Image: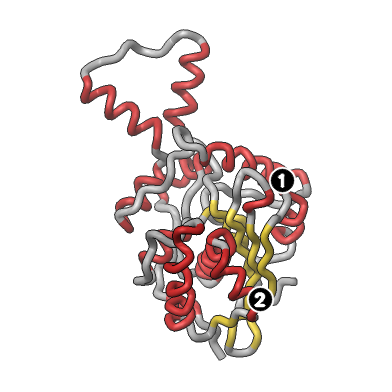
Amino acid sequence: MSAGPTRPVVAGVDLATEPVRTALAVLVERGRTVVVEELLLGVGDMAILDVARRVDRLGLDSPIGWPEEFLAFVTAHATGAVAAPGTEAESRALRRRLALRETDRDVHARTGLTPLSVSTDRIGLTAVRAAGLLAGLAAAGESVDRGGEGRVVEVYPAACLKLWGLPHRGYKGSAGSLVRADLLPALLAAAPWLRLPPAAAALARADDNAFDAILAALAARAVALGRAHACPPEHRARAGREGWVRLPSTPLSGLAPTP
């Protein structure tokens, strides 16, 4: 499926705990346009692994690691070695450290948004599924780099929307259907080179998971084109264990195909 480094084929997955709410989008360059070639809802692990092996980059909307402090805390708790509470301020600071990864703090610094906590929110179940997917890729001989330089990269669709100057709140679920109805044309106006077949456009309007899969694929395209923020060198070792969100460093116009 790969079209080479200058015309990357990319995919995006909005991962959920169960396949029924998991969506997959594949973007392919066609001349001066980028076409949503596939947009699927109800995607299982084998389908994701198959696509991941055939594209240049796959953007995964799910945490792919846990905060190091959280892992150390759980291990200490298992052996009865957790320290007694200190002051209220110290306890609050500890909970904050346990809840957020280094990349979550980086996302907040760049966008003002804070990703869901993989250690304290229900998204942790989705992260367990993501860990299994990465293990599946590794077992198939694929190189897996949680630090954001591998074939699979962690992405954050809402932060992408904000960085691209588009509405980033209120578009989820059935209550967000009217917001999505306006957001999709706004996305296409900001990226006039992006083409959605009618069935894909209808699915993206009807289901926020499908819409996020397209955004995840666009974020993967930013990474493939070298137009995304990389993990700072001082955080590389930690990101290799915790994961790292790759945020676009360019407006949507910077992702347009070149002659």
Nearest the camera: 245 or 159?
A: 159
Q: At which x and y percent is residue 140?
A: 78, 48
Q: At which x and y percent is residue 67?
A: 45, 35
Residue 138's tag is 1
| 218 versus 137 height, above or below | below
Query: Looking at the rendering, in which quadrant would you find the C terminus?
Result: bottom right
Horizontal side of residue 111 vs 54, given as left or right: left
N-term-proximal mark, 2 vs 1: 1
Residue 246 appears anywhere in the view: no
Q: Secondary structure at mark 2?
A: helix
Residue 207 image-quadrant placement: bottom right
Nearest the camera: 1 or 20?
A: 20
Q: Secondary structure at mark 1?
A: helix
Nearest the camera: 195 or 70?
A: 195
Query: Looking at the rendering, in which quadrant would you find the N terminus?
Result: bottom right
Tell me whether the residue at label 2 lies in contact with that at label 1, contact meaning CB atoms closer than 8 angstroms.
no
Residue at 46% x, 76% y: name it.
187
Residue at 69% x, 56% y: name it.
42
Q: Tag 2: residue type? A: Ala
Q: At which x and y percent is residue 238?
A: 46, 40
| 60 versus 195 height, above or below | above
Residue at 67% x, 51% y: name it.
20
User: Disc 2 versus disc 1: distance between alpha carbons?
Assistant: 34 Å
Q: Report which residue position mark 2 lands on.
A: 199
Q: Tag 1: residue type? A: Ala
Nearest the camera: 19 or 255?
A: 19
Residue at 48% x, 49% y: name it.
244
Residue 256's tag is none
